Amino acid sequence: MHWGFEFWPLLPLFWIGIVALFCWGAFRRFGWRDTRRSFDAPFEPDALETLRRRYARGEIDGTTFDQMRERLEHSGRPRD
C-alpha cells in the first residue's frame, strides 16, 4: 500500500541526474568543441621553407634552388 514512500530519498538524486544529463548534452552541443579544433590545425611551412626542404632532400639542384629562391624573395616585395 505504501510502496512509493520508501524511495523518496532517491527522488532528489533522480532530478540531479536529469539536470546533469541535460547540462552534459548542452555542453556537448554548444561547448568548446570548435575552439579546440582551431588549435589542432596542422602547421604549413611557407614557400621558402618548402623550397629549402626540397633542396635538402635532393629533389632540386643548387641552380634551380637559387633561381626559385630569388623569384620567391622578389615576389614578396612591393613593386615600385
Image (cartoon, grey):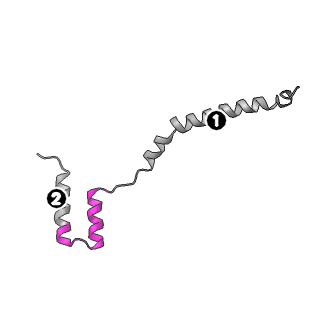
The quarter of the displayed image where residue 15 is located: top right
The residue pinned by badge 1 equals 21
Measure how far apart labels 1 and 2 are at the Cα level: 59 Å
Dominant secondary-structure state across the stretch colored magenta: helix
- On the image, the x and y values in percent for residue 45 come to 33, 57
Question: For the residue labelled by badge 1, is the local secondary structure a helix, a strand or a loop?
Answer: helix
In the rendered structure, find residue 74 and report the number of the disc placed on it: none
- On the image, the x and y values in percent for residue 56 come to 29, 71
- At a point 88% along the width and 26% down the height, the residue shown is 2
Asked whether 1 falls inside the magenta stretch, the response is no
- At a point 44% along the width and 50% down the height, the residue shown is 40
Instruction: Indicate the amino acid at tag 1.
Output: Leu
- On the image, the x and y values in percent for residue 10 come to 79, 32
Q: Is residue 71 above or below residue 79?
A: below
- On the image, the x and y values in percent for residue 6 come to 86, 30
- At a point 58% along the width and 36% down the height, the residue shown is 25
* Pick the front one: 53 or 5: 5
The residue pinned by badge 2 equals 71
The magenta stretch is 45-65
Q: Is residue 24 above or below residue 59?
A: above
